[in-house]
């Protein structure tokens, strides 16, 4: 049994919750206004219990800033309504500098490369703090633009401080970014591959292997109904991914890295993979994810990533 704080799935108010460990791990909570809710926290109690034992304090450091809500794709893991104005560069810079004690600055959106001042913002911020850009790669695939961002401050040694998300909708531009990296002898900082079913791990692992020379960190994220991702009706938990990986090759946990109920580092057949299955409004354990990355929600509150995405994404 664990007492924690969660959110009411109706009104998003913070309410106390109890986590029970049995054949699975289940959360019970009651909102004074909206009644009682029960939800699954993990399929496999062994994974949940191991995480309690590991007691990791953090997932990863960082402060995320949306520089725009506009996007040139309809991404699977975007909780933004596409559109609106770009955020003023001066405002982004002030926000980033104010919060730099929270870890690297992570510029996101929307699609941050649509902001005409992105290279200027990176140039301004890089001397203050390690600065990252999360992108779908569509604009980054342009060699001139890629080099402009790198020389503005995204290139550290051979690592481009960018998070590249894969989308079928990008018509191969994501892979072109990786080819660019290969040609120039760079590695991309991190990548994001969303899966709707555990069987899609096969495609994710194949991609990670094919580009292992140019990808520093490969993340696999379970689709979430938080972002209305297709096929997310059956939530994929970390233990489900680990089970599949175990059935398809030698897999071990990297205990020296941060591992949590919703986040795991594994070595699968020699590949370092990061598995992510963010909580959603049904099962979020706010005590467990009282850690970075940090992100200011549209209501002005500073929260961990999952909570801000819940606030920004709902109520639906
Ligand atoms: Zn409520």
Image: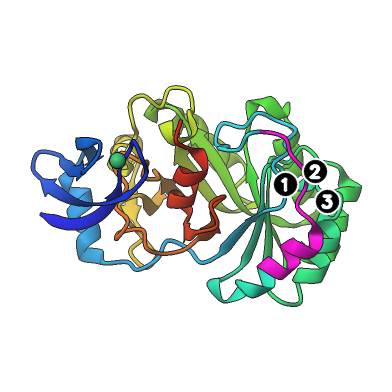
Residue that badge 1 annotates: 68
Horizontal and vertical percent position of residue 150: 81, 60
Camera-side residue of 315 and 160: 315
Do the residues bearing badges 1 and 2 touch, measured as CB atoms within 8 Å?
yes
Relative placement, left or right, of 91 versus 228 is right
Residue 174 among those drawn in magenta: no
Do the residues bearing badges 1 and 3 touch, measured as CB atoms within 8 Å?
no
Q: Earlier in the sequence, mark 1 or mark 2?
A: 1
| Quarter of the image that includes the N terminus | bottom left
Relative placement, left or right, of 248 versus 174 is left
What is the span of residues highlighted in magenta in the rendered image? Answer: 82-95
Q: Residues within 10 Å of mark 3 (few under 14, many from 20)?
A: many
Residue drawn at (36%, 40%) of the image:
11
Horizontal and vertical percent position of residue 297: 54, 53
For the residue labelled by badge 3, is the local secondary structure a helix, a strand or a loop?
helix
Question: Which quadrant holds residue 121?
Answer: bottom right
Which marked residue is nearer to the observer: mark 2 or mark 3?
A: 2
Ligand 1 image-quadrant field: top left
Q: Earlier in the sequence, mark 2 or mark 3?
A: 2
Furthest residue toward front: 33
Horizontal and vertical percent position of residue 12: 37, 44
Residue that badge 2 annotates: 114
Task: Quote the CA–CA distance across marks 2 and 3.
Answer: 13 Å
Q: Earlier in the sequence, mark 1 or mark 3?
A: 1
Residue drawn at (40%, 27%) of the image:
232
Would residue 11 be seen by someone viewing this image from the given angle? yes
For the residue labelled by badge 2, is the local secondary structure a helix, a strand or a loop?
helix
For the residue labelled by badge 1, is the local secondary structure a helix, a strand or a loop?
loop
Relative placement, left or right, of 114 versus 255 is right
The circle drawn on residue 146 is: 3
Camera-side residue of 289 and 191: 289
Furthest residue toward right: 144
């Amino acid at each position: 049994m664990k007492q924690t704080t969660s959110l009411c799935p109706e009104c998003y108010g913070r309410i106390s919750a109890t986590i029970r460990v049995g054949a699975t791990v289940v959360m019970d909570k009651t909102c004074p206004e909206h009644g009682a809710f029960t939800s699954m926290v993990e399929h496999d109690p062994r994974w949940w219990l191991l995480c309690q034992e590991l007691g990791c304090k953090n997932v990863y450091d960082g402060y995320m800033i949306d520089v725009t809500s506009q996007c040139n794709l309809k991404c699977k893991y975007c909780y933004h309504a596409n559109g609106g104005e770009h955020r003023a560069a001066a405002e982004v810079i002030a926000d980033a500098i104010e919060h730099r004690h929270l870890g690297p600055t992570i510029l996101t959106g929307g699609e941050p490369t649509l902001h005409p001042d992105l290279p200027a913002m990176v140039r301004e911020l890089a001397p203050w703090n390690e600065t990252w850009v999360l992108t779908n790669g569509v604009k980054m695939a342009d060699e001139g633009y890629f080099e402009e961002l790198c020389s503005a401050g995204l290139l550290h040694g051979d690592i481009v401080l960018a998070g590249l998300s894969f989308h079928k909708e990008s018509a191969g531009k994501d892979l072109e970014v990786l080819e660019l990296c290969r040609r120039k002898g760079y590695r991309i900082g991190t990548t994001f591959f969303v899966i709707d079913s555990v069987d899609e791990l096969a495609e994710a692992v194949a991609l990670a292997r094919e580009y292992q020379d140019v990808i520093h960190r490969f993340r696999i994220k379970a689709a979430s109904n938080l972002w209305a991702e297709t096929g997310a009706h059956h939530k994929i938990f970390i233990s489900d991914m680990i089970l599949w990986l175990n059935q398809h090759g030698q897999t071990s946990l990297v205990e020296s890295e941060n591992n949590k109920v919703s986040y795991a580092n594994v070595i699968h057949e020699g590949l370092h993979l990061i598995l992510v299955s963010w909580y959603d409004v049904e099962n979020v354990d706010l005590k467990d994810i009282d850690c970075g990355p940090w992100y200011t929600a549209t209501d002005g509150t500073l929260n961990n990533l999952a909570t801000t995405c819940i606030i920004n994404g709902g109520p639906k």
